[in-house]
Amino acid sequence: MKFFFAPEQLLHQQASEFNRGELTAPFETGTRAEAVLAALQAAFPGCAGEVGAFSLAPILAVHDQSYVAFLKEAYAEWTSEGRSGDAFPMAWPAQGMRAEITPSSIVGKISRYSFEISTGITANSWEAARRSAETALTGARDIAIGAPAAFSLCRPPGHHAGRGYFGGYCYLNNAAIAAQFLRAEGAARIAILDVDYHHGNGTQQIFFDRADVFYISIHADPDTDFPYFLGYADEIGAGAGEAFNLNIPLSRGATWSAYGQALAHSLKEIKDYGPDALIVSLGVDTSAGDLLSGFLLQREDFRSMGAQIGGLGTRTLFVFEGGYSVNDIGANVTEVLEGFLD
Ligand SMILES: [Zn+2]
């Protein structure tokens, strides 16, 4: 199995983030990607592949043109209005306010295109995000031309990014972009299995009314955890997409006992769906001791997770999402991939 990583993804680095009432060092850092990269290089020597360059077309097949134009120019606009430091949103349109307006002020614009306060835009966020999407696309292309599996080491992550908004450390929805690319390359049906601790609100939004991409997520109950306003079990898809969105929220403190059952159920649903390809949004922030999360998966559980996914026998692209305990994430990703390959 090849793995793909573009070093330009490291260029995005916020100076700080606002989390739980405090200004802290950012949790989503390039160090995370470097830790996973080092683990993959040790576990899979000779399997590193080059990340290709793509036009904007596969990104615009998923994201709104106005949003992509905003992302490209946001930081330059921020500094041209006399501001320094990282660009952050400030105010969101609550119920009764004018959600359809895009203010001309960059502060208003950043607010318009975001949904939460911890994620900002730096001078290099666009370049890093674009290369992250291209890392996913390179893995998808590898699958499209016949590889049974690939791993795209994407950073910044993607699953919280919606069609027209960023947040949750995500700017471009790497898994969604890869799924749409595989559809364009001839796959009739794609399943996206999201095993990150947090619900992938962006991925759900993008495919909610479609039957050709089945989104399944196992995650912390949004009643207690980010992103709070999406990810509940009664969100099953709409229109043609009805029954092709499956949310399995689990309580904080979940161990492999509950998680393994949820995973087995998810894989049964995917098998019945019969996808031409599977994309796994692989967050390992389900690990016990993760800095931002509350599940209690152990090292060996990640191997079981990989083995169960591998049991499907479907060609599979793994796209890296969350995981914030830098000392553990490389080993946990490696366990998933080794379990998958066994
Ligand atoms: Zn997460």
Image: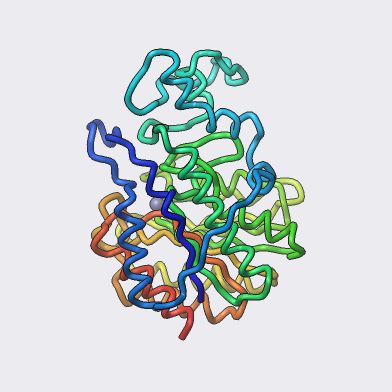
Write the residue at 48% across / 82% down. 341
The residue nearer to you, when weighing 101 against 39, is 39
Which quadrant of the structure image shows residue 190? bottom right
- 332 sits left or right of 222 in the view: left
* Picture coordinates of residue 114, whole percent (x, y): 49, 31
The picture quadrant where one finds residue 153 is bottom left
Is residue 195 something one can see in this rendering? no
Instruction: Specify whether 302 is left or right of 60.
Output: left
Above or below — where is 307 with respect to 322? below
Residue located at (61% from left, 74% from top) = 315
Residue 115 image point, x, y percent: 47, 32
Q: Is residue 138 above or below residue 45?
A: above
Image spot of residue 321 (x, y percent)? 44, 55
Q: Residue at x 37, y 45 (%)?
A: 225
Instruction: Look at the image and name its color scheme.
Output: rainbow
Q: Nearer the viewer, residue 166 or 41?
A: 41
Q: How many marks?
A: 0
> Residue at point 59% right, 53% down?
53
* x and y, in percent, of residue 116 in the image: 42, 32
Q: Is residue 251 visible to us here?
A: yes
Q: Nearer the viewer, residue 299 or 220?
A: 299
> Residue lying furthest bottom in this view?
342
